[in-house]
Image (spheres, rainbow, N blue to C red):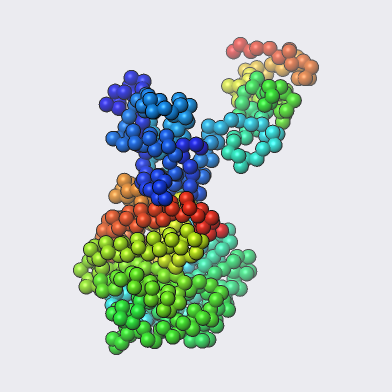
Amino acid sequence: MSAIIEAAGLTTYKLGEYHPFQAAGVEFLYLVPSGAIFALEGTAREVIDLLKDGEAPRELIVKTLLNRGHTRQSIETTLAEMEEIEAIYSGKRPNPIPSKIPLQEFPLQRVVLNVTNQCNLACTYCYEYSDDKITQTTGKQKYMSTDVAESAIDMLVRESATRRGIHVTFFGGETLLNFPVMRSTVEYANSKAAEAGKSIEFSLTTNATLLTPEIVDFLSEHRIGVTVSIDGDRELNDRQRVFHNGKGSYDVIVPKIKDLLKRHRTNSIGARVTLTAGVSDVRRIYKHLTEEIGFDSVGFSPATASPQRLYSIGPQKMDNVLDAFAALAWEYRDLALTGHQHGFTNVSDTLKELHSGISKAYPCGAGLGLLGVSTEGDIGLCHRFVDSPVGKMGHLSEGGIDHEARREFLGTHHIGARYDCHTCWARPVCAGGCYHEAFIHHGNTSAANLHYCDWIRGWNDVCLQVYGEIAVRNPKFLDRFAEN
Amino acid sequence: MNSVKAINRKAKKVEQVAIAESGDVHALQQGKSKADGKVYHPMGCTLNFTPGWEVDISGGTAGLCQPVERDLFDCYLGCGWPAQVPDHLNNAPDWTDKCSSAANDWRKVDIVFP
């Protein structure tokens, strides 16, 4: 039909690609793939409505709107503007997928140093030790040496090229089992960054069992951001986060965390919760970690696990998690409307991306600006892939980054190559999801994580509504998401 | 934009591009910044506009950043863009022989028939 109309010289309009949402009585379009968010004014709303069956001739739209009392000028302006932002289009459909940019030497921004592959806890769901593990640490050095750590820092400074800000994340195993190397590496990295005229930041992920007042002083002195793995109150945390003898870790870590929160004020300290089959009461966990323990920020993520694992959270529980996330997100919105910050980082992280209008070619920085380094100097896509045959990106003792492997990886994992994602409106923020999750579930890092698509779309819809309402009622709040 | 309101940062960028693509052209010397979303082409540059176009925003020549005569010779001698003026290198090497001073002798520059 449209071809006949167009052949007759008549313009036909069709709806562009977008996700519509409402907030604070305003209708919005989240445009895909640009990631732009526009609010619709009166005439534009009517145009969308007239096109809701898919398409309509321009003349019909103009005539209908003239009959409704709109002026010809306002109709023409509306159609032109909506076409310019690709909310509607005539003729050929705009290309939905960004073309691949030939990647040259992409500057490194962050290395994650797995300073040990050992851990004093035996959390059931750990991707490093569970049945789903892809790392092969048997026979490998248990602790990173000073030489390897310094060589990794040299690589970061060298490969960051002209990038001014660089970042080092200390990871494990349990990172603090190798605190001496962490300490000396911070000093070495500071001096190397200063020599190169770069600014450097550090972060640490820890289970908090080995924190001491001296370590807290060190973290505070060097402004090291800390992420503490903890799954909630005693009952919930100790279901999975146990020592090797089966004893829960809660009673050991809580006094240490409180001391950390009290005395380390120079950088952010966040809690990271892993959701599993028995640990999914999001509200209860959030309340406990913020009100009882004192964290300012809490982030949640489901355990990466094959569906057959007992601790795997499963689709039904994840639906409940989405409801609980939404309830906390509305709480976030209510606080934001009064200018206050809520600590649910899953919302703030997503709002930041929605505010900038990110449109990702890759789901995360792994292999791009971020690389992981193992205890012996094996370089992987990220900390989850070091000492693994998958996602290998070179070795410190073999010339550093394998640029050919990196280029090949980035070529095959670009959103343009993820055909399953090409019709999904959430692709600007998701881009297919975690490589590690994809490998565990689908056996391939380049597979889209189809098992959680509905969840991701549901969550992004909630966040868009939160964003829309803040944008209408307290737009100044969004200034905090401005890029540095 | 009147019918849609840009909300996030990307939308503001999309809006800027849309306005820039449909906006008026202004001379550089009009003193406006790029921030208002208008397109600013350097007037007098023959890479953008053909000779004969060169008038300023008021329709005269006083506000151009280059005198019109400069464009003529830039195209003919330096630019080598044959679509715009006769080509000095191959086809019309003597086109401006009678025009020693463009400001005075421009009438002597005649039409060329290839």
Identify the residue at the far front of this view: A69
Residue B17 in sight from this viewpoint: yes
Where residue B41 appears, x then y in whole percent?
62, 33
A3 up-or-down from A146: above or below: above
Where residue A293 appears, x then y in whole percent?
43, 79
Where residue A94 appears, x then y in whole percent?
39, 37
Residue A416 in sight from this viewpoint: no
User: In front here: A77 or B81?
Assistant: A77
Q: For the point 31% across and 23% down, which residue is it?
A: A5
Tell me if A406 is positioned left or right of A8 in this view: right
Quadrant including the N terminus of chain A: top left
Q: Would you identify the image quadrant in which residue A31 lies?
A: top left
Tell me if A82 is positioned left or right of B57 in this view: left
Q: How many numbered discs sit on the rendered protein?
A: 0
User: In front here: A328 or A264?
Assistant: A328
Q: For the point 65% across and 12% down, which residue is it?
A: B111
A139 up-or-down from A433: above or below: below
Quadrant including the C terminus of chain A: bottom right
Q: Would you identify the image quadrant in which residue B89 lies?
A: top right
Where residue B15 appears, x then y in whole percent?
51, 40
Q: For the point 47% across and 60% down, which residue is it?
A: A336
A437 up-or-down from A145: above or below: above
Q: For the point 32% across and 48% down, which residue is it?
A: A424
User: In front here: A414 or A227?
Assistant: A227
A193 up-or-down from A115: above or below: above
